[in-house]
Each structure stands twice: as C-alpha cells, then as structure tokens.
C-alpha cells in the first residue's frame, strides 16, 4: 500500500507528521521517518479537511456570466434552457473540466451534480482524481425510452474510479417532475441503494404553485407522497415554515444551502435560525456557475455566515459551525468516512499556506479560512490520499 508522510504540518496547534496509508489517515502523530513513505514537506502549512459541495451543475460553468441579474423563471425559461438545448457532449466535457479545476483549486474534493451527458462528467472526475455524486437527472418531459436508458445505465454501472463516484437519482424539482414520476424515482433509487437529489422550496412562486396544485406546501407535499427520508439531498429550502423545518429534521433530510445563488437570483433569505433550531442536517452548495457564478465553496461558507448574521444576531452560525456544514456534515450525508482529520478517515485535506498575508496573524485557523482566506491560501489539495493540486 502506498504511504505518504506529510511532514511538519500544523494540526490542532502543534507541528507534527501525519501518515497516510492508501486512501486513509493512518497516524496523526507519526515519527519523522517512515520506511517506504513518500514525503511531502509541509513546513509553514496547516492541515484542514477538504470541502464538499453538495449542490451544483458542474458543466454550467459554460453559462457563467451568460444571463445575470434576472428572476429565476425568466432566467430558466428564456436563457438557460434554450442554451442548454444546444449543448453537445463535447461541450459538457469542457464545462465539467473547467468546473472540476475550479473546485479543486478552491479546496473542494467532492461535488453533488445534477446535469446530463453524465458519462462526460464521470470521465473528467475520474481523470482529476476527485469525488462526485453524479445525478441521473429526471424531468417530466423525458420520454419513456430516455427513462429506460437511464435505468439501464444505473444497472450496468461500474465505478471506474474504484469508489470515488456514486450515482444519485435527481428528479429536478416538484415543478418539473409530476407526482407519479417522483414516486417512481424514489422507489427506483431506494431499490438500487441510491441517494435522491432535488431542488426544493427555492422560490415563493414554487410554494404558491404547489399550494394551488397540491393543496400543500412543497415539503408537506413531498412528505405526503413518501419521498422524504435520510437519503434525500434537498437543495435550497429557502421558503419553509416551522412545521416544514420539523418535517425535514424528523425525516433526516439533508439540506443543501446555496447562499450565493439564492442572493443573486433574489430567491429569498435562508431561514437559518429555524432550520438550525429544528435540528436539520445542513450542508453547503455553490449551485451552478450560471447562478452563483463561481464554484468556490469557501466563499459560500463566508456568505452563509454573513447572511445568517445580517438578520441581527452575530452569534448565529459561527465559523466552526459553517465549516462543519461544508466538511463533516456533507461527507456524512453521502456516506463518506471523511470531512475531518481523523485516523481511519479518508485522506481528503487541504494544506493551508500560513505565510499568505490573509492568514496572518493566525489567532484562529478556521476563522481565518472562513472569513479571510481565498483560494490562494490553499497550497495543496489531497483527495483519497493523493495530491490532486
Ligand atoms: Zn441548482
């Protein structure tokens, strides 16, 4: 098994040597020399867990800056969907390449994706050495033949990366997928041990239309049809009331909060206090680069923390908590023993350059990383025990 010794790295206030064996952290207090181990000189850096982006559309980097500053429905109907209708598999590959590079360089080793031509994105993730949950997107207007093709793809699936990629069923949203298909999709996912990924309660319009059509708000509607469970990743959840927050917590749903996208599309302000108080598992996403404009999850941490406090409570969502959303909570939601620097955990980590001016002085490493840093502070990124940046 390959061994990598990270030498002289700052971890929890002390300089030490950390040994990685294969994909995992083996010893957080290793000796200065380990037989057969490659050495990574980490002098002047600190180690932190890498970031996990729980909601994006990677290939949409191609639409970065293409249609800004307009409401969600106009943006989707008049710009995004017509543009996407013209994309080729080659385009998807190029968009995914840009996305993967951007995510890795800004410290994310994982993304939960929802798009199409998934083979292209899978190939790019494989080559880059990172992780992903690849969504098999389901829309109401997909034909029976297309649906069958997707199911066949899932049945034939072999992960080319040896464990870095999982497939997820991704019905787009309650306003683009009908009740019958949502039920079928959930059943198929559960029969095949897959997670579910959906956009939920993103805008007021979505809530109003759902109430008109189903006499229930979106979370209650999905709960009524048996969709919600600990295997569901729900992106946005901006417009949820106290009762719905309770349902999300009780069903064990993972919320993917996308602060930049919500602010830019004017979707509303995430109900931080309500969802935290209810005990929901909250994680962070960037959404696609067409609405968040970048895939920098560190920046999403900062925006989330600031937006939470902007309501008037500076104690809401401290740096440590938002950092946990972006690391351990996210990894856990996807069944990964990762998201913390711990023996036996997957060796996904960042080496932070402490000589960078944004990291000085360093009273609190996590606080600096959340509030002051940018991608330039990240010297190396490791995923699955291998140096990927
Ligand atoms: Zn989205």
Image (cartoon, rainbow, N blue to C red):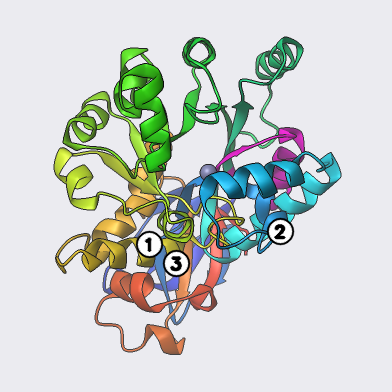
Q: CA distance from mark 2 to mark 1?
A: 21 Å
Q: What residue did someone put label 3 on?
A: 299
Q: Earlier in the sequence, mark 2 or mark 3?
A: 2
From the viewer's side, name the closer residue of 174 and 7.
174
Residue 253 on image: x %, y % = 32, 30
Residue 31 on image: x %, y % = 40, 65
Q: What residue did someone put label 1 on?
A: 301
Confirm or deny contact between disc 1 and disc 3 (CB under 8 A). Answer: yes
Confirm or deny contact between disc 2 and disc 3 (CB under 8 A). Answer: no
Q: What residue did someone put label 2 on?
A: 98
State the extent of the magenta-drawn residues as a range.
Answer: 111-131
Badge 3 element: helix
Badge 2 element: helix
Q: Earlier in the sequence, mark 2 or mark 1?
A: 2
Residue 111 on image: x %, y % = 54, 46
From the viewer's side, name the closer residue of 226 and 11.
226
């Amino acid at each position: 098994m390959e061994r990598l010794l990270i030498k002289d790295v700052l971890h929890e206030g002390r300089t030490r040597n950390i040994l990685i064996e294969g994909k995992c952290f083996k010893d957080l207090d290793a000796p200065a020399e380990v037989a057969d181990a490659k050495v990574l000189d980490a002098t002047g850096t600190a180690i932190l867990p890498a970031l996990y982006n729980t909601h994006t559309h990677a290939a949409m980097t191609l639409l970065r800056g293409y249609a800004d500053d307009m409401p969600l429905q106009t943006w989707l109907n008049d710009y995004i969907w017509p543009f996407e209708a013209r994309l080729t598999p080659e385009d998807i590959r190029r968009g995914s390449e840009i996305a993967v590079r951007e995510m890795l360089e800004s410290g994310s080793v994982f993304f939960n994706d929802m798009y199409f031509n998934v083979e292209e994105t899978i190939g790019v993730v494989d080559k880059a050495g990172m992780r992903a949950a690849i969504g098999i997107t389901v829309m109401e207007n997909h034909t029976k033949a297309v649906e069958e093709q997707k199911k066949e793809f899932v049945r034939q699936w072999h992960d080319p990366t040896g464990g870095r990629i999982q497939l997820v069923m991704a019905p787009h949203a309650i306003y683009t997928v009908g009740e019958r298909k949502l039920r079928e999709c959930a059943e198929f996912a559960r029969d095949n041990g897959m997670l579910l990924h959906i956009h939920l309660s993103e805008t007021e319009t979505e809530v109003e239309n759902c109430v008109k059509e189903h006499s229930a708000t979106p979370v209650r509607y999905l709960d009524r049809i048996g969709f919600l469970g600990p295997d569901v990743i729900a992106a946005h959840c901006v417009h949820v009331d106290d009762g719905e927050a309770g349902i999300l917590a009780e069903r064990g749903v993972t919320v993917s909060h996308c602060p930049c996208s919500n602010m830019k599309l004017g979707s509303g302000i995430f109900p931080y206090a309500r969802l935290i108080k209810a005990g929901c598992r909250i994680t962070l996403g960037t959404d696609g680069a067409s609405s968040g404009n970048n895939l920098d999850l560190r920046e999403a941490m900062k925006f989330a923390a600031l937006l939470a406090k902007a309501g008037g409570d500076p104690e809401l969502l401290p740096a440590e908590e938002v950092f946990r959303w972006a690391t351990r909570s996210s990894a856990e939601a996807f069944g990964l023993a990762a998201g913390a620097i711990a023996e036996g955990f997957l060796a996904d980590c960042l080496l932070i350059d402490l000589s960078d001016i944004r990291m000085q002085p360093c009273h609190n490493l996590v606080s600096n990383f959340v509030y002051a840093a940018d991608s330039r502070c990240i010297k190396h990124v490791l995923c699955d025990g291998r140096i990927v940046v």
